[in-house]
Each structure stands twice: as C-alpha cells, then as structure tokens.
Image: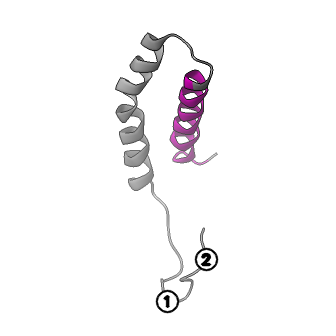
Amino acid sequence: MKNYLLPVYLVTAFLIIYVTAIQANLNTAIILFMFSVSPLPIIWMVYKVLTADVKVESTFEEKWYEDQ
C-alpha cells in the first residue's frame, strides 16, 4: 500500500464510525469527543497527501480529464 493512502483509509473509517455513533445514539460524551478531535486526523491526512512523493508523468494538457 502506498504510504499516503493509509491516512485516507483511517480518516474515512473515523468518519464512518462517527456517523454510525450518531445514528446509533451512543453516549453524547463519545460523540462530542470524536467531534472535538476530528480536525486533527483531517489535518494529518491532508498533510500526508500533499507531501506525498508522487511522480506525475503527464501534463494537464495531455490528460486533463483522466483522474489517477
């Protein structure tokens, strides 16, 4: 697995757990704690993705509609 995909998977799992906790009507303290720490994993994920060493071989003009 590429090292920048792990934060994406973990933060997505965190989001799914958070939404499930709200829908399951779990303890409010747990939901508020998850809400209060949620900016930290998101900042971590954005930092890891933006600083990932990904070599792009093509230019925007060559592949302007292809998402890789």
Quadrant into which the N terminus falls: top right
Task: Tally the marks.
Answer: 2
Residue corresponding to mark 2: 66
Which residue corresponds to the image point at 60% horizontal and 25% vertical from the top-left? 23
Decide: is 68 above or below 39.
below
Nearer to us in this view, 54 or 68: 68
Asked whether, in this view, residue 9 is left or right of residue 52, the answer is: right
At horizontal 40% and vertical 31% (from top left) the residue drawn is 38
Q: Main secondary structure of the magenta part?
A: helix
Q: Residue 18 in the image: x percent, y percent?
A: 53, 27
Q: Quadrant of residue 9?
A: top right
| Residue type at the position of mark 1 | Glu
Q: How is the image coloured?
A: one colour
Residue 30, magenta (yes or no) = no
Seen at 39% across and 55% down, the residue is 50
Residue 9 horizontal side relative to residue 32, left or right: right
Image quarter hosting the C terminus: bottom right
Q: Which residues make up the magenta segment?
A: 2-22
Left or right, 28 with reference to 37: right
- Element at label 1: loop
Look at label 2 and name its amino acid.
Answer: Glu
Q: Residue shown at 36%/32% (left/top)?
A: 40
> How dense is the environment of label 2, judged by Cα within 10 Å: few (below 14), some, or many (20 and up)?
few
Secondary element type, mark 2: loop
Label 1 Cα crowd, 10 Å radius (few <14 / some 14-19 / many 20+): few
1 or 2: tag closer to the N-terminus: 1
Q: Position of residue 29 (x, y in %)?
A: 42, 11
CA distance for labels 1 and 2: 11 Å
Label 1 sits on residue: 61
